[in-house]
Image (spheres, helix red, strand yellow):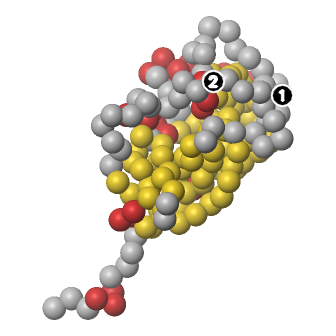
């Protein structure tokens, strides 16, 4: 017979941010840091949601504007706007969000699968977290980029590494 005291509630620890009036969450394990928006260098011939690149302590990081990626109206950056630096399979990427609001723990049993019908493309959703009267849209970070953007970002990372190796 199983001892009920040994049952451990699994939790997801999330960085919560706002886009418009909605709250989103990403796993804290994937977040490297949260920064104010520095100057962004725009890149030609990229998807409209690719805002450009930033120089973060000598590393060139691509920046994705999540408002544009999610089809929300564009908004000027303000004092609350932040870039969440996350680790993706292609390397580190910055995500422009309206505001980072908190870090929280959410029990696994409070996370439901993504609904089949949403305004967002369902492959971008990892699920929906329920916390009291709040709903948190949990993002599937690995799906934020199309295959073409993944290839392009890998090329940026390789060219940056080559420049660093050559002492530039």
Asked if residue 53 lies left or right of residue 68, the reply is right
Residue 154's image quarter?
A: top right
The circle drawn on residue 79 is: none
Nearer-the-camera pick, 20 or 163: 20
Return the residue at label 1: 39
In the image, what residue occupies the spot 77% across and 27% down?
A: 76
Residue 66 appears at what percent x and percent y? 60, 32
Nearer-the-camera pick, 138 or 154: 138
Describe the element under mark 1 as helix, strand or loop: loop
Return the residue at label 2: 73
Residue 166 appears at what percent x and percent y? 76, 25
46 to 36, vertically: above or below: above
Callout 2 environment at 10 Å: few (<14), some (14 to 19), or many (20+)?
Answer: few
Residue 143's image quarter?
A: top left
Name the image quarter holding the C terminus: top right
Residue 116 appears at what percent x and percent y? 30, 37
In the image, what residue occupies the spot 57% across and 15% down?
A: 47
Name the image quarter holding the N terminus: bottom left
Nearer the viewer's eye, disc 2 or disc 1? 2
Is residue 17 visible in this depiction of the protein? yes
Q: Residue furthest front?
A: 133
Nearer-the-camera pick, 92 or 14: 14
Q: Earlier in the sequence, mark 2 or mark 1?
A: 1
């Amino acid at each position: 017979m199983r001892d009920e005291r040994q049952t451990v509630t699994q939790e997801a620890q999330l960085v919560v941010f706002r886009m418009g009036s909605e709250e989103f969450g990403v796993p804290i394990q994937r977040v490297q840091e949260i920064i104010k928006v520095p100057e962004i260098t725009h890149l030609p011939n990229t998807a409209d949601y690719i805002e450009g690149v930033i120089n973060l302590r000598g590393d060139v990081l691509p920046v994705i504007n999540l408002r544009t990626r999610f089809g929300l109206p564009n908004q000027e950056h303000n004092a609350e706007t932040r870039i969440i630096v996350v680790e993706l399979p292609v390397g580190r990427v910055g995500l422009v969000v309206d505001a980072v609001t908190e870090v929280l723990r959410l029990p696994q049993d409070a996370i439901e699968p993504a609904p089949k019908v949403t305004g967002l493309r369902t492959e971008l959703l990892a699920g929906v977290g329920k916390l009291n009267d709040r709903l948190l849209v949990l993002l599937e970070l690995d799906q934020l980029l199309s295959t073409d953007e993944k290839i392009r970002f890998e090329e940026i990372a390789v060219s940056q590494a080559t420049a660093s190796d050559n002492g530039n």
